[in-house]
């Protein structure tokens, strides 16, 4: 059974048109992460939540926002997508920091900007 | 600056050969994980190492955590085409706020 589910798997959006990617989890993990991954590169952390506490990486553009309405769901909002935002977006969950922080990933959403 | 240095970046070998991928840091990690990722999919966890000097085996894959918990290696014996993929090491360290950070990855291609 899928434990971290991302929707949609593929998303095409127009340049400058807001887009939202979604992630849900059945693991009841406290921590949820959003990563951006470009072709054959390592995932780059955008931000993460520890419960409702939001933690933004210093180099994450303001164009990227996130919401976590409850433990199970987390959303990534891209306010004005540019061509450079085309990438795979990965959601992951884990137990709290300091414990075994192995992460469980969704299948990702491939974002194309046209 | 990469918090976890992974090498080599790319490896192309023949079926049946052995290989080792390295993951190094100047900081101590609470734990290190190895993931394998196929194109168009999310990373899949292979193993977690927690104790300094720990060795774990997963079929033809052997994982080792350095004694000082600053480095790790992944050794594959008799590689097969199905091992092809992107291998990522990742870990959490008090030096980096205990967030999960990734190495740059190693692209492995095993030719038949």
Image (cartoon, rainbow, N blue to C red):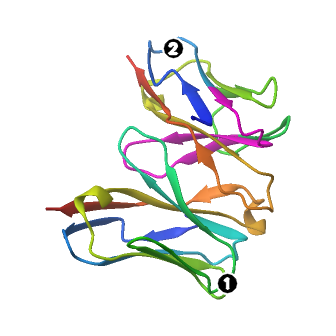
User: Chain for mark 1?
Assistant: B
For the magenta stretch, what is the residue range?
Answer: A23-47
**Which of the two residues, A59 or B56, is positioned nearer the viewer here?**
B56
Residue A86 lies left or right of residue B101; in this view the side is: left
> In which quadrant of the rendered view does residue B16 lie?
bottom left
Asked whether residue B1 appears in the rendered view, the answer is no
Residue A21 placed where, x, y %? 58, 22
**Which of the two residues, A9 or A44, is positioned nearer the viewer here?**
A9
Q: In the image, is residue B71 part of the stretch drawn in magenta?
A: no
Q: Which circle, 1 or 2, is nearer the viewer?
A: 1
Tell me the residue that label 1 is attached to: B52
Which dot marks residue B11?
Answer: none
Residue B32 placed where, x, y %? 62, 68
Location of residue B89 with respect to A41 vertically, above or below: below
Crowding at label 2, few (<14), some or many (≥20) Cα neighbours within 10 Å? Answer: some
Q: Residue at x 64, y 88 (%)?
A: B67
Residue A10 placed where, x, y %? 43, 22
């Amino acid at each position: 059974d899928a434990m971290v589910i991302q929707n949609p798997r593929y998303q095409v959006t127009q340049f400058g048109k807001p887009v939202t990617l979604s992630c849900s989890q059945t693991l009841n993990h406290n921590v949820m992460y959003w990563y951006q991954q470009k072709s054959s590169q390592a995932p780059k952390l955008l931000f993460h939540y520890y419960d409702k506490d939001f933690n933004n990486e210093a180099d994450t553009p303001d164009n990227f926002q996130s919401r976590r309405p409850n433990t199970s769901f987390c959303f990534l909002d891209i306010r004005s997508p540019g061509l450079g935002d085309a990438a795979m977006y990965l959601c992951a969950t884990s137990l709290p920091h300091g414990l075994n922080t192995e992460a469980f990933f969704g299948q990702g959403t491939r974002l194309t900007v046209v | 600056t990469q918090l976890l240095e992974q090498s080599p970046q790319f490896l192309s070998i023949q079926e049946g050969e052995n290989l080792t991928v390295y993951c190094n840091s100047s900081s101590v990690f609470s734990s290190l994980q190895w993931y394998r990722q196929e194109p168009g999919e999310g990373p899949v966890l292979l193993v977690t190492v927690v104790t300094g000097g720990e060795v774990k085996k997963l079929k033809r894959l052997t994982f080792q955590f350095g004694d000082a918990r600053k480095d790790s290696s992944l050794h594959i014996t008799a590689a097969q085409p199905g091992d092809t993929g992107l291998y990522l090491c990742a870990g959490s360290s008090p030096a980096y706020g205990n967030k999960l950070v990734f190495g740059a990855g190693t692209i492995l291609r095993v030719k038949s």
